[in-house]
Amino acid sequence: MPTAAQPPTSATQDPAPPEPAGAGAPQGVLLVALSTLAVLGAVLIAPVQPSIARAFAGEPGLDVLVPLSLTVPALAIAVLAPVAGRVVDRAGRVRVLTVSLVLYSLFGTAPLWLDSLPAIVASRALVGIAEAGVMTCCTTLIGDLFHGPRRNRYFGLQTVATSLSAVVFIAAGGALAADHWRTPFWLYAIGVAGAVAARALLREPAPRRTGALPPLDRRALLLPLLVTLAGGLVFYTPIVELSFALDALGVTSTATVGAVSAAAAVATCAGAASFARVAHRGPRVLLPVAFALAGAGLAGLALATTVPTALVAAALASAGTGLLLPSVLTWALGGLGLEQRGRATGWWTSALFAGEFACPLVVLALTAGLGALPHALGAVALLALALAVLTRLVRLAPGPSTRSMTTIVK
């Protein structure tokens, strides 16, 4: 049974059978594209938060409910992704994906007609439940349909697409909100089109299971999940805090903030795009490099006194986080068999989004405790550098292999 103490295994080694028929570029592109829907849920309404607050002025709990409408989908994903993973292994990936996409549109467009702020927040939580299904299914299917270098390429593209889409969706939300704060919610209707495409292009990689599911080796997954949780916090820190760091430097121009943020997004994409070319080095090399880059960049951002310095630091941190996500994902899921992958993906997705949800809360607490945002960024930088050392010293291997799971079942 593989554990974290065994010799490192290359991220491209996979005991899974050959790729099934019909696993090609259309399927890969669709799954990568559908993976961006969770980003749509997270950032689309960010530009309309002040408008929502004005529309419901005087409603009890306004100061809590408005920001909660933005963050509650991530919390729902963190809580329910493990449940989605179990359903995926039991009922089938494409079935769950199709239903999740339809529910995504149904719940996502609900604020077009809701007149109560608590009801809108509740609909946002339901969007998170649908997103848990979408994210778990998309990542699981990429692992099912593709192996070796092709899988690595699509895992890297998944991070590229989600990073770029965040910029696009924020801009789209702002543009659509010029008409009315409710208008951006129409974009959630794209889930129905995604459901139609999924039914047309995707096939279940395995027949629906009726017997007991083979158990997961949770001990082998524990370390990857803990690193993913901490890595999620590190990943979202430059995304969430960059504008505040620039504000602390006295930057008031939205054009400057937008330009620096766009440069950081490009660096994230570059880091993620490089993964396919370096995946053969394995997690014991890639994870320390990714965390070291992120830590150095965050430390530079904490110490920056000029905009050019902040730009270079943000780009360095973002390049590291771009490499981080596909590296830790492949480490966690690379050795899993077909009947375990859905549940493991659910737990991994839960850990990642828990880190996302906790990120602003942790940074806020550190800022209050240490006295200033740069000090908080320095603390997160130290966390990233500590993880770089940890992942270098601990001998990393992918999650439970098919052979190991056979032993467990017996």
Image (cartoon, grey):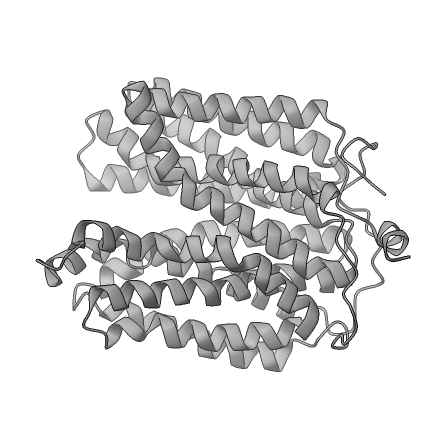
Q: Position of residue 2 (x, y in %)?
A: 83, 41
| Quadrant of the drawing holding the N terminus | top right
Identity of the residue drawn at 24% across and 65% down: 176
Q: Residue at x 32, y 74 (%)?
A: 109
Q: Nearer the viewer, residue 277 or 206?
A: 206
- Residue 7 in sight here: yes
Q: Is residue 10 left or right of residue 410?
A: left
Position of 311 relative to 205 (above/below):
above
Front residue (pair 189, 113): 113
Q: Report if residue 142 is visible in the image.
A: no
Reply above or below: 308 against 81.
above
The residue located at (28%, 60%) in the rendering is: 173
* Residue 48 x/y as whole percent: 21, 57
Q: Is residue 235 above or below residue 208?
A: above
Q: Quadrant of residue 273?
A: top right
Q: Quadrant of residue 254?
A: top left
Badge count: 0
Pinpoint residue 388: horizontal percent, then vertical percent. Answer: 61, 25
| Image-quadrant location for residue 206 | bottom right
Quarter of the figure with the C terminus: bottom right
Q: Residue at x 43, y 71 (%)?
A: 104
Report x, y in % for residue 370: 32, 19
Give the camera-side residue of 128 and 306: 128
